[in-house]
Image (tube, rainbow, N blue to C red):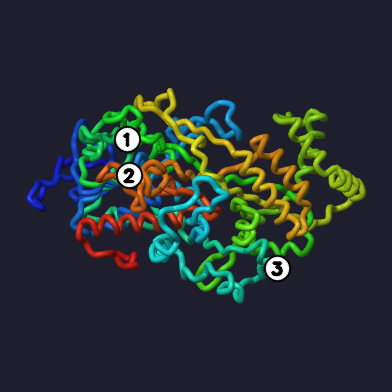
Amino acid sequence: MAPSQLAGARTDERAGRKQTACFIWVNDTTTMFIDARHVPEGGTAQADLCVIGAGAAGISLAMEFVDTPLRVILLESGGLMADSDGHGIYQVVPDSNPHLSVDPSRTWYFGGNTNHWAGNCRPLDEADFEPRDWVRNSGWPIRKHHLLQYYERAQAMCGLSDFRCYDLDTCRPHLNHPPLDVDPSLLTTKVLHTCPVPSFADLYRERLETADNVRVWLGTSARRLKTNAGGDHVRIVETVGADGRRSHIEADVFVLAAGGVENPRLLLCSNDADPNGLANAHDLVGRFFMEHWYVDIPLGRWRGAVEDLDFYGGRQPVGGATVWGQIMLSEELMRKKRLLGLSLWFPSTTPAPLSVCSAQRVMASLRGRARLTQPFTDIRLALSDPGEVARHALRKLSRRGKNPQPREVYSLRVQLEQTPNPENRIRLSPGRDRHGEPRAELLLRLADEDWRSHARSLRIAAAELGLNGRRLTRQIRLMLRAGRNGFFWHHMGTTRMHGDPTQGVVDANCRVHGVSNLFVAGSSVFPTGGTAPPTLTIVALALRLAEHLRQSRGMPGRSADLSR
């Protein structure tokens, strides 16, 4: 609804000074969601806390301050519904490997990536936080025990049930099909939970709409942060609406929660005090970009019954939770063989192995029924298992004219951890967005040392699962070289956490080094990525940051009750 009246400010006296916060009336009823089109050109709003980005991290932070004395502005570049702006999230540097989708169109809106994810959650493992001498730049300044209480609260924040159901032995008696029997010194099964309502917009929109002290600015993007002359204190964030209308927000504390691409882009654009960008004296902003890479490999028949794989692809209820499993390398094996993290699961069925699928594409091309974009890759994949191609052709000939018989078939998904590498980075592009702001571009490669680790892991895991490890590693290598891999949009590492400002962008409390009132929330602070989906850790870190901010204000801590 269009507002019948725009009131420029509400003022009240607190702590001996005047505070101002923009708000509007809709049909004589105050709403806490403000469309940027109704913010005055050149206007300035004031708040105690400004959170930039309304995804899982930003909404979690805002919820922690609902019904407190603090005035909070939550800034979101999108609206309440998906609306692609056609300008993309970033550009991929030409000739980079792998061949990522260039300039993917973004559909950012309230709720962020929780509007698009599958809702899968698992806490990071203890080993993910620890330094690994065989993994460059690994190690967090905190350990898992520092997050445990926040993980349990994050579990409730995500709408999930008992945190104890991540323990396989707790779930085992209730599973329809048991996990695979594997050597625990080599492989282990980890339990994941799936959110019943994945979208934080659906979970928390109504509560934020009725919160007296929170304003959610929609359709408003942060342009840059303006600091004092010394660059150690942020004064305002300059904003621009979808219609180009510009305004400012003054706040005591600012939190960047806009994701692993936009967080560093905004810091790099904020270059008034330092031409290299805010908090970038050591050229660390935007570096150490990490993703969770995956490759899907159709493999054909399974050695046993397909039902044995149900826990690794389907979902089942256990004690109020919806759970499933992934196969991981054991910590013992990773330390002994000095390996990166690897996870395997079986998400779907497919009618033929990878070599057969590639041979079928080659044959369709020769018959003029299709056009191959990567013919040499398909030929190599077909030749990776010529015996299976021949057997498939013979089976097809033997069944000609008969009703096809169903076959027990399956496919394998392989997810790869990535070493934190400073050469994988987000940087400013020469290109500009529609508001004239520099866009981001991505440089990303899977290092040879990473692949050597994963090749060793795959051969070990394949042998334990009864698969052909040599063929599997060859096929995955061909898929990676051809860019036939996927990503989960887990943008991590670009404002990494480290106690030493020459090694990281934020400290253990997620405060930006050298800037007194600027913090970062989200997976961009992850020093390493591990193999777990990042959202539960994102929310746990946001709750931990909120607790730190509350304590710095002398406010009592929050309970685990999220019904407020």
Determine whether the residue tagged by mark 2 lies in a helix, strand or loop: loop
Q: In this view of the protein, which residue sits in the foreground, 162 or 148?
A: 148
Determine whether the residue tagged by mark 3 lies in a helix, strand or loop: loop
Q: CA distance from mark 2 to mark 3?
A: 46 Å
Q: Residue at x 23, y 40 (%)?
A: 233
| CB within 8 Å, label 3 to label 1 | no
Tag 3 residue = 181
Relative to 403, 172 lies left or right: left
The residue at the far top in this view is 430
- Near mark 3 (Cα within 10 A), the count class, few <14, some 14-19 or many ≥20, is few
Q: In this view of the protein, which residue sits in the foreground, 14 or 471?
A: 471
Q: CA distance from mark 1 to mark 2?
A: 9 Å
In which quarter of the view is residue 150 placed?
Answer: bottom left
Tag 1 residue = 278
Q: In this view of the protein, which residue sits in the foreground, 6 or 422?
A: 422
| Amino acid type, callout 3 | Asp
| Amino acid type, callout 2 | Val
Q: Residue at x 55, y 62 (%)?
A: 192
Which circle, 3 or 1, is nearer the viewer?
Answer: 1
| CB within 8 Å, label 1 to label 2 | yes
Q: Residue at x 29, y 57 (%)?
A: 548
Q: Tag 2 or tag 1, which sits nearer the N-term?
A: 1
Q: CA distance from mark 3 to mark 1?
A: 52 Å
